[in-house]
Amino acid sequence: MPQAIAAVNDFVVKFANVNGSGSASANELFARSILRMGVPVSPRNIFPSNIQGLPTWYEVRVTEKGYLGRRGGVDMMVAMNPQTWGEDVREIEPGGYLFYDSTKPMPSSMFREDINVIGVPLTAVTNATYSDARQRQLFKNIIYVGALSVLLDIDPEEIKRLFGEQFKGKEKLLDSNVKALNLGRDWATQHLDVGAVKLKVRRADNVGKRIFVEGNNAAALGAVYGGATVCAWYPITPSSSLAEAFMAHCKRLRHDKATGKAKYAIVQAEDELASIGMVIGAAWNGARAFTSTSGPGISLMTEFIGLASFAEVPAVIVNVQRGGPSTGMPTRTQQSDLLSCAYASNGDTKHVLLFPEDPKECFDFTAEALDLADRLQTPVFVMTDLDIGMNHRLCHPFEWDDKRDLDRGKVMTAEELQAGKNFGRYLDVDGDGIPYRTYPGTHPTKGSYFTRGTTKDEYARYSEEGAVYVRNMERLQKKFMTAARIAPQPVRYSSPKATRHGVIYFGSTSPAMAEALDHLEEGGNHVNALRVRAFPFAQSVEDFIHEHDKVFIVEQNRDAQLRTMILSEFTLDARKLIPVLHYDGTPITARFIAADIAKKLAQLKVVPFEKAAS
Amino acid sequence: MTYIAKPKLHHPSLVKNKAGYTRRDYEGAVSTLCAGCGHDSISAAIIQACYELDILPHQVAKLSGIGCSSKAPTYFVGASHGFNTVHGRMPSVMTGANLANKDLIYMGVSGDGDSASIGLGQFAHVMRRGVNMTYIVMNNGVYGLTKGQFSATADKGSISKKGVANSDESIDMVSLAILMGATFVGRSFSGDKHQLVPLIKAAMAHKGAAFLDVISPCVAFNNHAGSTKSYDYVREHNEALNRIDFIEGREEITASYEPGTVTTVQQHDGSLLRLRKLGEEYDPSDKIAAMQRVQEGLAAGEVVTGLLYLDAAPKDLHSNLNTVDVPLNRLKTADLCPGSATLDRINAGLR
Ligand SMILES: Cc1ncc(C[n+]2csc(CCOP(=O)(O)OP(=O)(O)O)c2C)c(N)n1
Ligand code: SF4
């Protein structure tokens, strides 16, 4: 056998499956069982935009240190898809392991010299026990989990406990799954040299109170806690599971106990134009409303976003970004809708964007977005992406302060109107650019006004007078600056050593970045880091850039969109901002970031020849 | 163009309705539409209907799209909130507004361009969802605001002011509304207030998706080349068309005729409109018969008017969604936020 990779609690296993074979739940079971042993894991679904029969991958990073980004490279490939055999085998690190179904013997030319091959006759073992075709398909997956649990030292009791939770009250299913698991375990124990596999899981205590959840599920729960009562949506990958999760949460949490009636309304609209229209109508009428979508949906919503912004109606849009442009890479991840969201619609428009880093912030920021949209009376985008949205991530548990009240912003009540308070719908009473609004139906004679996308004066009266228009536009700009103060502020990480180099990043890049910073530090490359959490940018973003000679901006898009926005919002020397770009549709890795920054730092150190000579 | 507020002087002898309001209380700003535009007659009918229904003006929410017709909400029930949305998409905004507060009275106003062209999709879906509303299309067969292009309801073979013949089939909004599941469908003529006012009242009283197609002649039809009041002239002089001083004022076209009879009305452009009022014996509760009657009328070149279809016990969007009795926009933090103890349980389930 070639030199084998040896690692405890620090390796990557990748499953190559055929879509529709029922492998997803078995693979997740594998990941969860390791988690239950107190060892952090970070899984990634990698799937094409097809329904059945095509390849799908599930990559599990086992990481005692808790690095939750993608590492890059594969230590063990569970190659269950003949179609992708070639590329799967190629991907294994030298000294890594190939686990495959050895029912049909394979010529050695199908393997690599520098990897370790583990064959288990899965089909034969399965067929010997099960006659039903569907059972054969499903239990084969459990059988390989069983075999792997032996090879990697995963405690079978944890797997059985997971079965127990999954099949609570369905004893038959529970028993048959345990049986399949044992089938795999027994075969492996009897036929394999378990000691030759040097990737092992050891019990640890590094998970703590953390939870394991998908960003879409978390954002949906955030919408419940944030008091959203209206959700209008149109199916689009990777955002559909968000609206579906909202539906599921509402079913459990939002029915009136006495009457069984719903304290929410969910409408699957006819398209994205309608879904954002419904959100705007509901928010105009005083409900908290949101929609979830992805890139092409944003394209369709653009005209309405302009209306909401100019007429100053709240709206929350969760954009679970995917690869663009157009239909692009519908099941791959990117951060490439920044510009199209920040400046959506015709005319001078700018919108508030929030950038959650993980499911915890998906929860927090969605609830926060509902408050912000009401406070600012404007659309607010929660910019997640497929990587956070559709993958389980280990994160801090959700928290809620019971003293927190939904912040409905400046709404003038019937009592205030009755008391004679001056109501001008677009009057800047407090100097923060945010006017007061009234909900329709508030008062018999006071406070009603006309909402429109055309220009108007402080009292909502249609006016095309230049000075009136300019005044309004300037107030909107002031309101935008208020948004910079009240939106989530950037988070700063300082290098232990003083440095003139900084890095700015945002959103789902976060876990890979955290690991990359460690790698850079180990390599003697010191950088301070700033994680941007909202647009408009806080003043501290500009300050951070001024504090450093060079600032890397790490993004998952081709055109350095965040960099473009920073340059357009502040007066800066563009040469200071060095883009680090990854946009092939896979989640950015720590290896990529660290290597790219290290390379660029080395280039910065090179002294030009003439200078050196002079 | 600026907003013109109507003087709020009330004549002491103005009669008050049961809600304590006079007819004037249901008026809005002074119209800036062309004098004689059918849309203004419809606004007047809406004012009359609201007055007669003893509606509290502030309980009305008026929503519209974009177009001359969609400006009309400014001209009625001034004490209520209005929303001029974007072109063709009022139905979704209306749906959302209705979801938020089911207790208001929803009045949607749109044009044939707004609802039958760019907004056809949303029109169809707002009907099939059964949003409790009165949806009025002020149907003039043209785009008024953008100066006279054909709309999708223009009859095949009709000639535009530019002399172009319309080669496309026209869309019959009434048939479409019935087909899409509206539970109250009627058609009328802007000049026939005896028919229109009761229809609007009935539509507003209906607890489901009520649709009214109201034929509403556009006075700007009869512009012609060379006229300083033509579309081209107006466009060259770059002012909105709906300025009174650019359009010849015309008399409002009116028509009054008995149920069961046909009347011919001459429009401003000289074209003739044959209106057939349904007879007293017509039964609007039969959906298939209603479709047939409308189609027969179309085949005979007649515009059948009256209450065409009615489901007297409709289900609306809220009953379909089984929402609570309190309007959603009135629910408070305690009603909506499950609290930290529940969140701890959810966290525990995610380990
Ligand atoms: C997205 C968009 N496209 C085009 C327009 C231009 N536009 C304004 S009103 C209108 C047509 C109005 O026609 P109709 O609804 O029949 O109303 P009318 O003016 O005849 O009452 C058009 C095309 C617009 N405002 N928005
Ligand atoms: S252009 Fe036609 S539709 Fe528009 S206001 Fe004038 S008459 Fe009415």
Image: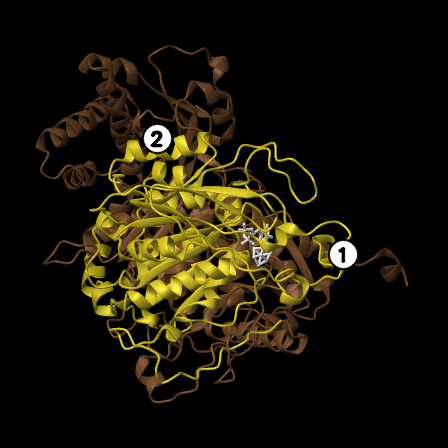
Chain colours: A brown, B yellow
**Residues at circles 1 and 2 in contact by the CB criterion of under 8 Å:** no
Q: Quadrant of residue B204?
A: bottom left
Q: Chain of mark 2?
A: B
Q: Which mark is residue A606?
A: 1
Q: Where is B141 relative to A47, above or below?
A: below
Q: Regarding ligand 2, which quadrant of the image does it lie in?
A: bottom right
Tell me where residue B103 sits by quadrant. Answer: bottom left
| Quadrant location of the N terminus of chain A in the rendered image | top left
> Callout 1: few (<14), some (14-19), or many (20+) C-alpha neighbours within 10 Å?
few
Q: Residue at x 57, y 40 (%)?
A: A326
Where, quadrant-wise, is the C terminus of chain A in this rendering?
bottom right
Is residue A475 at least partly visible in the picture? Answer: yes
Quick one: SS at disc 1? loop
Disc 2 within 8 angstroms of ligand 1 (CB): no
Name the spot of residue B138 as percent of width and height, x first. Answer: 47, 52
Q: Amino acid at mark 1?
A: Val
Residue A300 drawn at (x, y percent): 52, 47
Residue located at (59% from left, 75% from top): A472
Q: Between A313 and B213, which is closer to the camera in this rendering?
A: B213
User: Is residue A470 shown left or right of residue B343?
Assistant: right
Which residue in the rendered view is the most extreme toward the right? A614
Q: Chain of mark 1?
A: A
The location of residue A302, given as percent across then percent down, is 54, 53
Q: Amino acid at mark 2?
A: Gln
- Residue neighbourhood size for the residue with mark 2, other residues' Cα within 10 Å, grouped as few (<14), some (14–19), many (≥20): few
> Residue A285 versus residue B240: which sits nearer the camera?
B240
> Quick one: SS at disc 2?
helix
Q: Note whether A317 is above or below A476 in the view shown.
A: above
Q: Which mark is residue B292?
A: 2
